Amino acid sequence: MSTVSRTLADWTETVLGVPGRVVPVVAAPDQVLSRAGEPVDPCAAGTVQVAADLVATMRVSPGCVGLAAPQIGISAQVFAVDVTGHPKTVTGHGTFVLCNARLLEATRWRPGREGCMSVPDLTGDVKRATRVVVEAQLPGTGEPVRLVTDGFEARAAQHEIDHCAGLLFLDRVAGAHAVFPRKTYL
């Protein structure tokens, strides 16, 4: 079972107090995707707007379960996740945005297929922890939060933390044999 601090369980984007804008997602090889994002002040107006924009953009993007600031052209350590309704989800904490996230524990490593809005034509097999503990801050309040999660939500969080560190899933695949053309369904 996963646990989470009360602050994340109670967090919604209404705390941000600003409407999110749907913004374009940048694609590789855009330079912002290969640079480590800067730490942010979670209470700063710019950070709050980025958080709102991430949620708004994620919500209108079919199949999207996470989005990081570098993916919208901003070199910052901010990302949103929402795995609600995804068929692989066992543990889910709804929609949340984290700032300055640090992976404290990662256990039970397993390979799994990943895709990314910033690499729209490819998927790849990436080995990730299926249980993680992440410490971060909440945008808008700056409250510290600890996320303990597993399965698909753990994979999504690690994928977004990687974006904030300037890494794509392609940097984590075992080799060219683990990269595939994305399937398109009509």
Image: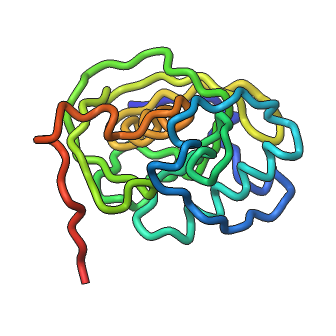
Residue at position x 32%, y 40% in the image? 170
Colouring mode (rainbow / by chain / secondary structure / one colour): rainbow
On the image, which quarter does residue 174 sit in? top left
Image position of 57 with respect to 82: above or below: below
Image position of 186 with respect to 159: above or below: below
Residue at position x 33%, y 46% in the image? 90
Image position of 53 with respect to 114: above or below: below
Relative placement, left or right, of 6 versus 183 is right
Place of residue 6 in the rendered image (x, y in percent of width and height, measured from the top left) = 66, 33
Relative placement, left or right, of 175 versus 86 is left
In the image, farthest residue toward the bottom: 186
Relative placement, left or right, of 61 versus 184 is right
Q: Nearer the viewer, residue 15 or 122?
A: 122
Residue at position x 88%, y 45% in the image? 45
Q: Nearer the viewer, residue 184 or 99?
A: 184
On the image, which quarter does residue 131 sit in? top left
Place of residue 150 in the rendered image (x, y in percent of width and height, measured from the top left) = 37, 33
Q: Nearer the viewer, residue 158 or 28?
A: 28
Q: Nearer the viewer, residue 90 or 49?
A: 49
